[in-house]
Image (tube, rainbow, N blue to C red):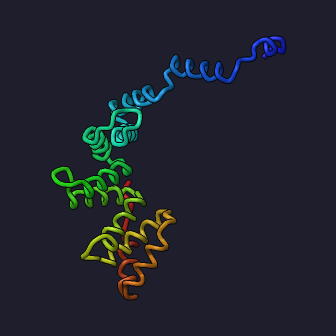
């Protein structure tokens, strides 16, 4: 800026905030426009945007909270094979009470996400099989932990150690064999 103009134009911090707010409103940078832009992409079929719109509705972020609408958007993204949406949809189905919730369908969606390489879904499946509720299948749980580790998950050592404490050496070997057979689908 020209030194003479700099001396003449010294806005106060309040004036600067007002100018920034006016610029944001004028250029459409506020939360409402963020939602609208994401919604436009979601309506055009972008699964990542569909997932984001779903989360916005579920959390009431930049839009009025609406669980039904949020779940609908997450499901649309899941149906397109978007792994984070498959995982989220599966976890919601497992946790929601009937008629919306369905534990078995939730597990199936988690498995879809896991087969698409989603390590968080793989860890969730380890918990389902070996931590959350009986009957426990420690071999299956360990399989998912090992798959998640192979996929780059770093938050599994405590789970692996807990499972190893419940398993025989032959069961750990079975889990390793099952994990070695697993192939991430593209």
Position above or below: 11 against 67: above
Which residue is situated farthest in the right direction here?
3
Res 47 seen here: no
> Could you tell me which residue is drawn at 33 percent across and 78 percent down?
138
Res 128 seen here: yes
Q: Nearer the viewer, residue 66 or 18?
A: 18
Say whether residue 76 is left or right of residue 154. Answer: left
> Could you tell me which residue is drawn at 35 percent across and 68 percent down?
127
> Could you tell me which residue is drawn at 39 percent across and 82 percent down?
172
Position above or below: 129 against 56: below
**Position of the N terminus by quadrant:** top right
| Residue 102: quarter of image | bottom left
Count of marks overlaid on the render? 0
Q: Position of residue 143 (x, y in %)?
A: 37, 73
Position above or below: 147 against 57: below
Q: Nearer the viewer, residue 90 or 44?
A: 90
> Could you tell me which residue is drawn at 40 percent across and 77 percent down?
176
Say whether residue 26 is left or right of residue 6. Answer: left
Position above or below: 122 against 143: above
| Residue 59: quarter of image | top left
Q: Position of residue 154 (x, y in %)?
A: 51, 65
Q: Position of residue 157 (x, y in %)?
A: 49, 73
Which residue is situated farthest in the left direction here?
99
Q: Position of residue 75 (x, y in %)?
A: 28, 45
| Residue 109: quarter of image | bottom left
């Amino acid at each position: 800026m020209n030194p003479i103009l700099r001396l003449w134009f010294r806005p106060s911090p309040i004036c600067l905030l007002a100018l920034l707010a006016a610029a944001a409103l004028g250029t459409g940078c506020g939360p409402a426009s963020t939602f609208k832009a994401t919604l436009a992409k979601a309506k055009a079929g972008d699964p990542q945007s569909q997932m984001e719109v779903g989360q916005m509705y579920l959390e009431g972020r930049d839009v009025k909270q609406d669980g039904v609408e949020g779940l609908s958007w997450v499901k649309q993204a899941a149906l397109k094979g978007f792994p984070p949406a498959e995982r989220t949809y599966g976890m919601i189905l497992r946790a929601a009470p009937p008629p919306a919730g369905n534990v078995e369908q939730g597990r199936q969606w988690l498995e879809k996400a896991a087969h698409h390489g989603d390590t968080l879904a793989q860890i969730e499946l380890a918990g389902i099989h070996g931590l959350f509720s009986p009957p426990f299948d420690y071999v299956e749980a360990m399989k998912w932990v090992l798959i998640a580790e192979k996929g780059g998950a770093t938050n599994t050592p405590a789970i692996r150690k807990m499972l190893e404490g419940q398993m025989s050496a032959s069961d750990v070997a079975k889990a390793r064999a099952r994990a070695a057979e697993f192939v991430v689908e593209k």
